[in-house]
Image: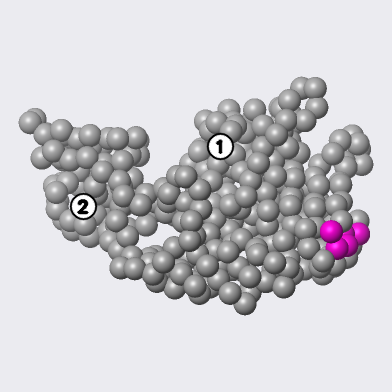
Amino acid sequence: MYLGPYQTAHYYNPVTNNIMASIENTSDFDFGCTRLEMIRTGNGASAAWDTTAGSKISNKAYKITAANNNAAAPYNLTLYYTKEEINGWAAATGNNVNELKIVKTSGDILAPVSAPVFSSVNSISNYGATFHKAISATFTGFSSFAITKPFSTRQCPAGNIIFGAGVPGSAYQWQVNTGSGYNNIVNNAFYSGVAADTLRLTSPPTLYYGYRYRCAVSTSFGTVYSPEFTLTFGMTWLGIQSKVWENPLNWGCGSLPDANTDVIINGGANFNPEVNSNATIRSLKVSPAANVMVKTGAVLIIKN
């Protein structure tokens, strides 16, 4: 289907005549012939980047290709899912339907090797008499897509973190959403490169857990927003020194988890952890092949 400047293309299933997707070109760029394929169907969820249930993507997935692709040309993508497809994904993942977003990757989303991309501009609405869902988001560059609950790679506390805009432009301004909308960032002890294509975070406090970042990029098509990045902190128990929770050398980050750190205890370590003194963490995920012992007189508080 041809997708010219400021045009909208609607794609229908040739067998059922049900709508599958809509693409609204919001710029004067000419994408030319733009093809949408449904590369997988189904009412459940499948593993992609992570095998945990909560990170699985929808079985139904799409691939979009255009005769002319442009990494800076923005478009609004709407994917249509039936009530059965949405409820099947929610049941398989344990996630709330209101948490889902469109996820994009630059390669094959059925077996991804590049990072997931989430938009900072999203919406969910009902369509049809039986409350099917239309999920919309703004992106640049075509690739493959599905839906999932957004997730991010957990960072080590006190580590250095880099976010890249991934959109070519003439000027950049990084923004942060701490829970009440996006605002511009200024360079300080924690942030540098706020006016460049790469934002650097230097030992950000773990209190920043859940902060979301994006870059406003000035392009020939106007202001285009980069993918959204969510900052989370986590560490894995290694148990190579001893069973002592309070020994930093037993942890993958070389430090102790705090109240804003997600903790993962995998099986196969030399020692399972024992908590000897009061500790607070954000969350705890323990493999069935491992265990955590809290010694008498100690308290382990799990906030989430």
Q: Nearer the viewer, mark 2 or mark 1?
A: 1
Element assignment for label 2? loop
Q: What's the magenta bit mostly, secondary-structure-wise?
A: loop
Left or right: 134 in relation to 258: right
Dot 1 crowding, Cα within 10 Å, few <14, some 14–19, many 20+: few
* 284 versus 131 height, above or below: below
From this viewpoint, is residue 268 visible?
no
Q: Are marks 2 and 1 in contact (CB under 8 Å)?
A: no
Q: Check residue 99 in the rendering and tell me which mark sits there, or answer none.
A: 1
Residue at (34%, 68%) from the top-left corner?
Answer: 188
Indicate left or right for 72 with 164 as reference. Answer: right
**Residue name at image x 70 percent, y 34 percent:** 125
Query: Foreground: 83 or 186?
Result: 186
Magenta stretch in the rendered image: 2-6
In the rendered image, residue 115, in percent from the top left (x then y), is placed at 55, 59
Give the residue type that dot 2 points to: Leu
* Residue furthest to the bottom: 170
Residue lying furthest top: 130
Total marks shown come to 2
Instruction: Please provide percent x and percent y for residue 96.
Output: 55, 31
State left or right for residue 301 relative to residue 61.
left
Task: Name the residue rendered at 55%, 71% in the picture.
Answer: 172
Q: In the image, what residue type sits under mark 1?
A: Glu
Is residue 5 located in the magenta-colored stretch of the structure? yes
Instruction: Return the x and y of residue 238 as percentages of the image width and height.
Output: 26, 53
Question: Please, which residue is most extreme toward the left here?
Answer: 297
Q: Name the disc covering residue 190, or none.
A: none
Q: Secondary structure at mark 1?
A: helix
Q: CA distance from mark 2 to mark 1?
A: 31 Å
Q: Which residue is mark 2?
A: 256
* Image quarter (top left, top right, bottom left or bottom right) of the N terminus: bottom right
> Is residue 38 at least partly visible in the picture?
yes
